[in-house]
């Protein structure tokens, strides 16, 4: 008897617990409220083709959609405006996308193959002010409309990232961006020739497109463009007629307005956050994250989120210079660099030491790489093995290279205004001085710095690379061909085996095999130390606590999933109480 | 004036275009460097070089420098300042967008400077070497010495709603929920609330200079015979000072005003940055960092024109208020 009562009680408990979602309707996401988020600068322009900056691509991401999108949790491609992933031909050269038929732009007009075809034509048109985006679509040689909802792209050569790149084209409404249909007469093939020989209508289109469509974007996304007050704010409004409303697998945003408030200095932004003029700062500076956001009041009002962004800072050694030509010198430099201490002292602990150019959260990252410890004795031993010693007693190590006596003296270049990089350089300089190595630190204005780096005018530089959370292609930075012509291999790293791996990598469509190749590539770099890889920095964000559903995803925070319980909503028309 | 103007623009053009740093590479840097290693289908660097060349051709940077200058001058004659590298918008449009904000700020701060400094100068002169004179003079010079970036940051941290007082807004020109539906008075009040701190911060350093000018010119006037006569007539000191002395000692101040003309559109990078105000200072500063030649040249040209006009204006004003000065007629 007692047992059965107990059982009944337990059963009752389980039932109520499971029914929680139903008994507390307040936990259901509701629409409403605004999100005031911090933007460090104005977007340059709001046009998915001609925009070239991070600020713009974040905002445009809410307005424009593409055929495929990345699943924010698995980072796998999944269809959005397309019915499914594209059909890829056997020779891996052509990609056929079928568009879904129930999607429409924010003005109600349906999205068709015509719009997709227009978008690729606009990208490929050499007169459109999008040369840097065009580089990514260099291999597209043709695009054909198969039926009103099907488009086939043809590429020059097989490339494992083609699907992601083609699937990522922002689909723009042709009737808005080319109202007179001036591009109708030409195909993608016609656009590949001499710009001067293009027909008159194409020239007119490009001129109009460059001049008149940079500030009022129209797309098909869940948010539509509201207004942009230069230097103050960009405002987006949730589109109540969004085609994806109620559709499974499509984001269902809840926040009525996204307001990107432009505050071009972090100190002012933090004050605005505290005074309630901002709801969110995606990036707090290390000082702000450790000292400026610890008060009880702050913690009551804001939740903090810490996560890594796919980027790293490094010291690049000019592999072509006589000093750094031998990998032993480069290895020694890494041994001299107290990276753990730098993370602790310079980044206030908000970072982690890395050993490879591949983002450490990626599956192709090699977890078994040798970790270079801070070990000056080992460093000196490695240098001695390479023949460096102080022969003339001037306190600086030297060695005879190519028949000339060369002292171990070099310059570390950093761009002025970057406190972290400057601190790294000075710390290393200090360490090296103790061991008979004369390093000097020079700060250079960013524009000049870029020139110097591209023209190989440096001994050592401190720089960073940003990567994507998805799989990357290391060809641009590490292939020997990229060392010439101001390429991104500015340190002139040249290794025949790495070249071969990177070439094969681009044509390999089997992910497992690619990952194996990536690991070999990392092992070679680990031994060669062309860079001294320093650290990845942690991003610390603050978000007002009234927002629910906030979660750190592989690509960071995602306001598309957030909502505010009705009682806590701060802005906008609220339904009158009873 | 015309040759001076040509000289100024030619020099500016040469310097701006030869400053180290390549705008094309900078533009590319944004897109390509950010994507570096993230898998762009860069078959060869040739594609990038072609992109750079395409971009330069779009903005006419592939032509020889003297041709570019002549084109620029020709466009200028039609009042066309070209379009910005950064967003391909017309430079006029960009300036027009920011000018009202800057002019509003500069106008009010000029007003404040004059409203405070002139009476201060008069007071110092009439109470020469008194304790009041010393105290106000010292105060004006202390303010003059306080760096504006420090004062602005302190104001922001302590009285703009951070961890301390919330007396003034921490930035922007209007409140977050400001709308045109508000009653007129509410809207004006909101704007004044937002303008107050920036205007005060823009002004305080100007008190010292102007009040010293005013003081010395006032002292000079007070020594004049006619002031003695006025006093001898038995006029009240108040009337002597305000009716007879102040007017005449204002003459040099008028000429300073004319020279302030270019300052009206200059803007302040510091105040604009601390208080998130979209003004001319930021426009110029960012344009220079980005090597946005058309914007930089436009601002230099406008400043040059306003300076020339200001000098002309001050000469004319001076002649108007001071009959001793006449142009070219002295020999007759």
Image: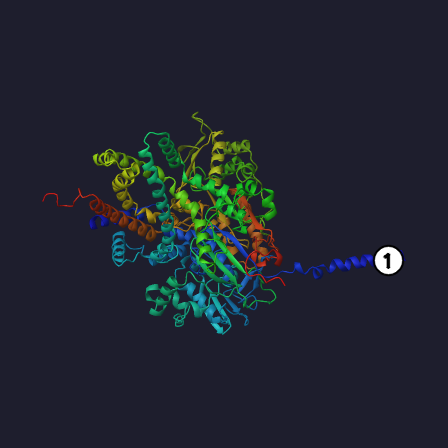
Give the secondary structure at mark 1.
helix
**Residue farthest toward the top in the current orientation of the protein:** A393
Q: Position of residue B112 (x, y in %)?
A: 37, 44
Q: Residues within 10 Å of mark 1 (few under 14, many from 20)?
A: few
Mark 1 — residue? A5
Q: Position of residue A413 (x, y in %)?
A: 43, 40
Q: Is residue B152 visible?
A: yes
Q: Residue at x 32, y 39 (%)?
A: B210
Q: Residue furthest left?
A: B332
Left or right of B153 in this view: A511: right
Q: Is A311 rendered above or below residue B238?
A: below
Q: Is residue B294 above or below residue B228?
A: below
Residue drawn at 53 percent across, 48 percent down: A275
Q: Nearer the viewer, residue A43 or A376?
A: A43
Chain for numbered disc 1: A
Q: Residue furthest bottom?
A: A147
């Amino acid at each position: 008897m007692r047992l059965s009562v107990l059982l009944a009680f337990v059963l009752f408990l389980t039932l109520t617990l499971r029914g929680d979602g139903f008994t507390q309707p307040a936990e259901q996401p509701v629409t409403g409220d605004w999100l005031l988020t911090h933007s460090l600068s104005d977007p340059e322009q709001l046009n998915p083709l001609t925009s070239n900056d991070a600020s713009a691509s974040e905002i445009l991401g809410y307005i424009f959609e593409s055929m495929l999108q990345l699943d924010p949790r698995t980072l796998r491609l999944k269809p959005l405006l397309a019915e499914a992933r594209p059909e890829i031909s056997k020779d891996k050269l052509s990609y056929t996308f079928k568009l879904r038929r129930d999607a429409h732009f924010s003005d109600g007009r349906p999205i068709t193959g015509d719009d997709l075809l227009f978008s690729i034509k606009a990208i490929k048109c050499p007169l459109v002010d999008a040369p840097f985006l065009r580089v990514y679509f260099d291999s597209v040689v043709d695009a054909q409309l198969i039926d009103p909802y099907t488009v086939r792209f043809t590429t020059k050569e097989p490339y494992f990232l083609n699907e992601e790149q083609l699937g990522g084209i922002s689909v723009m409404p042709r009737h808005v961006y080319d109202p007179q249909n001036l591009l109708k007469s030409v195909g993608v093939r016609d656009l590949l020739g001499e710009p001067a020989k293009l027909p008159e209508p194409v020239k007119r289109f490009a001129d109009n497109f460059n001049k008149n469509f940079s500030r009022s974007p129209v797309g098909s996304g869940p948010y539509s463009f509201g207004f942009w007050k230069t230097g103050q704010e960009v405002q987006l409004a949730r589109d109540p007629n969004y085609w994806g409303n109620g559709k499974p697998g499509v984001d269902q945003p809840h926040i009525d307005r996204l307001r990107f408030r432009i505050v071009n200095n972090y100190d002012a932004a933090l004050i605005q956050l505290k005074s309630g003029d901002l709801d969110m700062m995606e990036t707090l500076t290390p000082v702000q994250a450790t000292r400026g956001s610890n008060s009880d009041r702050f913690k009551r009002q804001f939740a903090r989120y810490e996560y890594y962004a796919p980027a790293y800072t490094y010291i690049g050694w000019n592999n072509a210079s006589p000093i750094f030509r031998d990998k032993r010198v480069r290895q020694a430099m890494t041994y001299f660099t107290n990276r753990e201490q730098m993370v602790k002292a310079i980044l206030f602990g908000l970072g982690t030491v890395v050993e490879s150019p591949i983002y450490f959260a990626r599956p192709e990252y090699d977890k078994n790489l040798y970790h270079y410890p801070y070990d000056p004795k080992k460093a000196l031993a490695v240098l001695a093995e390479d023949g460096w010693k102080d022969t003339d007693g001037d306190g600086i190590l030297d060695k005879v290279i190519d028949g000339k006596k060369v002292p171990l003296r070099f310059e570390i270049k950093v761009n002025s205004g970057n406190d972290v990089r400057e601190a790294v350089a000075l710390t290393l300089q200090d360490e090296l001085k103790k061991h008979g190595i004369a390093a000097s630190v020079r700060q250079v204005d960013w524009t000049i710095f870029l020139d110097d780096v591209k023209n190989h005018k440096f001994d050592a530089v401190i720089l960073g690379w940003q990567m994507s959370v998805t799989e990357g292609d290391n060809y641009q930075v590490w292939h020997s061909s990229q060392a010439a012509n101001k390429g991104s291999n500015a340190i002139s790293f040249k290794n025949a085996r790495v070249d071969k791996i990177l070439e094969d990598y681009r044509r390999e469509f089997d992910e497992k095999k690619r990952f194996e190749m990536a690991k070999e590539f990392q092992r070679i770099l680990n031994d060669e130390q062309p860079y001294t890889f320093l650290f990845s920095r942690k991003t610390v964000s603050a978000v007002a606590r009234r927002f629910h559903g906030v979660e750190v995803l592989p690509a960071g925070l995602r306001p598309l999933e957030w909502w505010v319980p009705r009682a806590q909503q701060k802005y906008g028309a609220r339904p009158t109480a009873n | 004036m015309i040759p001076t103007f040509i000289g100024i623009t030619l020099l500016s053009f040469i310097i701006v275009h030869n400053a180290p740093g390549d705008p094309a590479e900078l533009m590319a840097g944004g897109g390509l460097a950010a994507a570096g290693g993230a898998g762009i289908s860069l078959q060869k660097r040739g594609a990038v070089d072609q992109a750079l060349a395409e971009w330069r051709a779009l903005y006419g940077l592939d032509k020889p420098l003297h041709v570019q200058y002549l084109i620029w001058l020709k466009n200028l004659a039609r009042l066309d300042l070209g379009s910005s590298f950064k967003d391909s918008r017309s430079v006029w449009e960009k300036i027009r967008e920011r000018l009202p904000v800057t002019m509003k700020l500069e106008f009010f701060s000029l007003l404040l400077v004059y409203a405070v400094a002139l009476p201060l100068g008069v007071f110092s002169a009439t109470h020469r070497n008194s304790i009041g004179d010393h105290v106000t003079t010292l105060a004006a010079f202390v303010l003059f010495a306080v760096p504006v970036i420090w004062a602005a940051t302190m104001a922001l941290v302590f009285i703009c709603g951070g961890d301390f007082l919330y007396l003034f807004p921490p930035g922007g020109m209007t409140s977050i929920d400001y709308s045109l539906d508000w009653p007129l008075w509410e809207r004006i009040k909101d704007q004044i609330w937002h303008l107050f701190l920036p205007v005060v911060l823009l002004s305080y350093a100007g008190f010292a200079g102007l009040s010293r000018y005013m003081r010395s010119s006032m002292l000079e006037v007070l020594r004049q015979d006619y002031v003695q006569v006025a006093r001898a007539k038995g006029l009240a000191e108040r009337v002597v000072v305000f009716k007879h002395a102040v007017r005449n000692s204002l003459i040099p101040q008028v000429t300073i005003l004319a020279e302030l003309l270019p300052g009206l559109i200059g803007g302040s990078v510091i105040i604009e940055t601390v208080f998130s105000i979209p003004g001319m200072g930021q426009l110029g500063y960012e344009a220079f960092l980005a090597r946005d030649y058309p914007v930089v040249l436009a601002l230099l040209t406008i400043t040059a024109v306003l300076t020339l006009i200001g000098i002309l204006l001050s000469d004319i004003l001076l002649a108007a208020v001071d009959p001793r000065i006449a142009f070219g007629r002295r020999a007759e």
